[in-house]
Image (cartoon, helix red, strand yellow):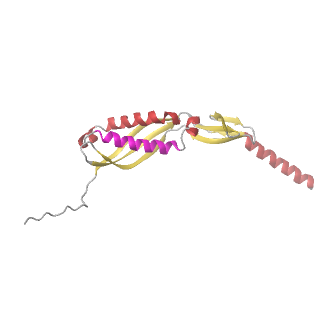
């Protein structure tokens, strides 16, 4: 009886050890491996073997295109008109090591940078040009965000302005001027 329990525990230990050693990385994903807490390698799709208790998969990155909504924000045009703009950004991890260790959250960082860049670009043009020059606005945002995101191991593929709305102030009431 004791021999059966010992062999059962031994078999369980072997199975657990196999799960710690063998890693299968799916297609279009990359795993970042750390050995004793330091970057060791990046594993692409396929079968890989790790050293148990020493190696660990620290990060998992998809190489697929990531689509993120850039939240609606208010911008002031060159002619001092407030507009509300939202957009969609497309990015992709190209360097998994830099994406893991370059910035804490590359998606959030890219979204924030896209918002600030968009405000800057909109501030340089008049309201009527914002509707006409969407393509140029998109290209300017992509250029600026992609340049800043290179150290993060991320490539910004596209940015699209989804909606531009002038902000109306119909809820404001102007003071009445009385003449005597």
Residue at (46% x, 35% y) in the render: 148
- Looking at the rendering, the stretch of residues picked out in magenta corresponds to 105-124
**Front-most of 80 and 165?**
80
**Residue 107 forms part of the magenta stretch:** yes
Q: Position of residue 131 (x, y in %)?
A: 27, 41
Quadrant that contains the N terminus: bottom right
In the displayed structure, does residue 162 sit left or right of residue 149? Answer: left
Q: Residue furthest front?
A: 180
Q: How many marks?
A: 0
Q: Is residue 51 magenta?
A: no
Question: Magenta stretch: dominant SS?
Answer: helix
Quadrant in the picture for residue 90:
top left
Location of residue 52 with respect to 177 vertically, above or below:
above
Q: Nearer the viewer, residue 20 or 166?
A: 166
Residue 144 appears at what percent x and percent y?
Answer: 41, 35
> On the picture, is 2 further left or further right than 156?
right
Q: Quadrant of the C terminus?
A: bottom left
User: Residue 150 placed where, x, y %?
Assistant: 49, 33
**Does residue 70 sit above or below 95 in this rendering?**
below
Q: Is residue 117 left or right of residue 21?
A: left
């Amino acid at each position: 009886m004791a021999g059966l329990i010992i062999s059962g525990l031994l078999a369980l230990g072997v199975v657990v050890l196999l799960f710690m050693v063998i890693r299968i990385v799916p297609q279009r994903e990359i795993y970042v491996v750390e050995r004793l807490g330091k970057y060791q390698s990046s594993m692409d799709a396929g079968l890989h073997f790790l050293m148990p208790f020493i190696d660990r998969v620290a990060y998992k990155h998809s190489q697929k295109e990531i689509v993120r909504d850039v939240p609606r924000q208010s911008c002031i045009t060159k002619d001092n008109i407030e507009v509300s703009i939202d957009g969609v950004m497309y990015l992709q991890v190209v360097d998994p090591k830099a994406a893991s260790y370059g910035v804490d959250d590359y998606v959030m960082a890219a979204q924030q940078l896209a918002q600030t860049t968009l405000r800057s670009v909109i501030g340089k043009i008049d309201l009527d040009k914002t509707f006409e020059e969407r393509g140029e606005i998109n290209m300017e945002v992509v250029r600026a965000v992609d340049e800043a995101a290179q150290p993060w191991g991320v490539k910004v593929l596209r940015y699209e302005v989804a909606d531009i709305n002038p902000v109306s102030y119909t809820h404001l009431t102007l003071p009445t001027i009385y003449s005597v």
